Amino acid sequence: MTADPKSIIDQLDDIEAEAKREWDQADPKDRPTIKSRYLGKKSKIKSILGALKDLSPEDRKTVGQKANQLQNSLNDHFVLDQVQSHRKAQYDHTLPGRVQPRGHRHILTQTMDDVVQIFYGMGFEVADGPEIESDYYNFSALNFPPDHPARDMQDTFFLNDEYLLRTHTSPVQVRVFEQRRPPVRILAPGRTYRNEAISARAYCVFHQVEGFFVDVDVTFADLKGVLSAFAQEYFGAQAQLRFRPSFFPFTEPSTEVDVNCLLCGGKGCALCKYEGWLEILGAGMIDPNVFTAVDYDPDVFTGYAFGMGIERIAMLKHGIDDIRVFYDNDLRFLQQF
Ligand code: DAH
């Protein structure tokens, strides 16, 4: 080998061109051999590097740098080319893409969100409470006397003597009243439980949304106003409400509210049990005993409260005639919403 640096550099250039040409034209199975021939221990480049000691210090530097650059450039060429051919083998860019299934909110979640949105527009804030509740919040503080038959109306899953699965969202009223002073205007959506025989109209788990407003001079007319506005907004302009007298320990007076059956237009059908009306909520003016228990002065403050069944309103709006379908998780049902 000549010790003329110029000719060594020419040699290196030739090696580069030759190596790349050989690599590009080679059958992929021969490529490992080519790679080791040009970059392995016994390569021409290595022997040139080995002969650097015969050069002057300056030439050594120039030639050394050039040889190193060449090794890097060949290495990049080989690697890049391998990556590209691997990609080509893996992806056919002309194929249409696979459609990824996309999930969405459950119809009950959508319904609760819609209800919250409507009341949010009327100035309500959202609150929540625990699903494992004490007897005190679920019953006593809501003016259910001990051993009163009203407790039996709500077939309860008791966990022990003190705790139970809440049978309604009304305990959230008490929890909020303990924390805040009027005015309070709250909406509390959530899950509730009852130990009832399962049927097309009743399930052991269901959802309610509790709403309540306490301030000075709140009247039953205010209650009718917000509920009517809600019904028009949620069900549409044809929705009408019917207020029937009822009883709840925590309201006086109390009412149950029906909406005209939207499926049959009030003529009577299986969904409304041929009544033309469907009950969607219980409501009333908050009983002074509830206020006293949380240290609100019933001579100063009045308030209304309501508790609405989420499954009920979803069934009515979408013409669903069996509550169990919400819990079966049959995609053919869920995907409709
Ligand atoms: N908590 C009652 C139930 O589950 C519904 C209800 C009635 C809620 C009257 C209220 C109310 O806030 O004022 O059956």
Image (cartoon, helix red, strand yellow):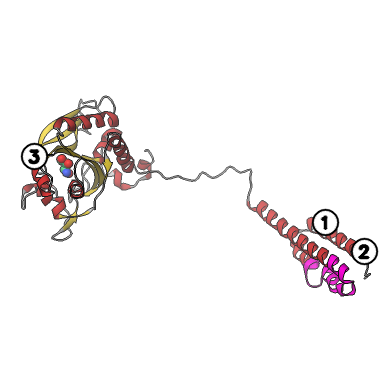
| Sooner in the amino-acid sequence: mark 1 or mark 2 | 2
Q: Is residue 66 left or right of residue 212?
A: right
Foreground disc of the pair 3, 2: 3
Magenta residues (range): 36-63
Horizontal and vertical percent position of residue 93:
63, 45
Most common SS among magenta residues: helix
Judged from the image, the quadrant occupied by ligand 1 is top left
> Would you say residue 274 is visible in this rendering?
no
- Residue 43 lies within the magenta run: yes
Horizontal and vertical percent position of residue 293:
11, 49
- The CA distance from mark 3 to mark 2 is 108 Å
> Would you say residue 108 is visible in this rendering?
yes
Query: Is the residue under label 2 in contact with that under label 1 (CB below 8 Å)?
Result: no
- Residue 102 lies within the magenta run: no
Residue indicated by mark 3 = 299
Horizontal and vertical percent position of residue 163:
17, 58
Q: Is residue 26 left or right of residue 8?
A: left
Q: Which of the two residues, 147 or 126, is positioned nearer the viewer here?
A: 126
Identity of the residue drawn at 29% across and 32% down: 234
Which mark, residue 21?
A: 1
The residue under label 1 is which amino acid type? Arg
Identity of the residue drawn at 9% across and 42% down: 288
Which mark, residue 7?
A: 2
- The CA distance from mark 3 to mark 1 is 98 Å
Identity of the residue drawn at 67% across and 55% down: 86
Query: Is the residue under label 2 in contact with that under label 3 (CB below 8 Å)?
Result: no
Residue 334 figure quarter = top left
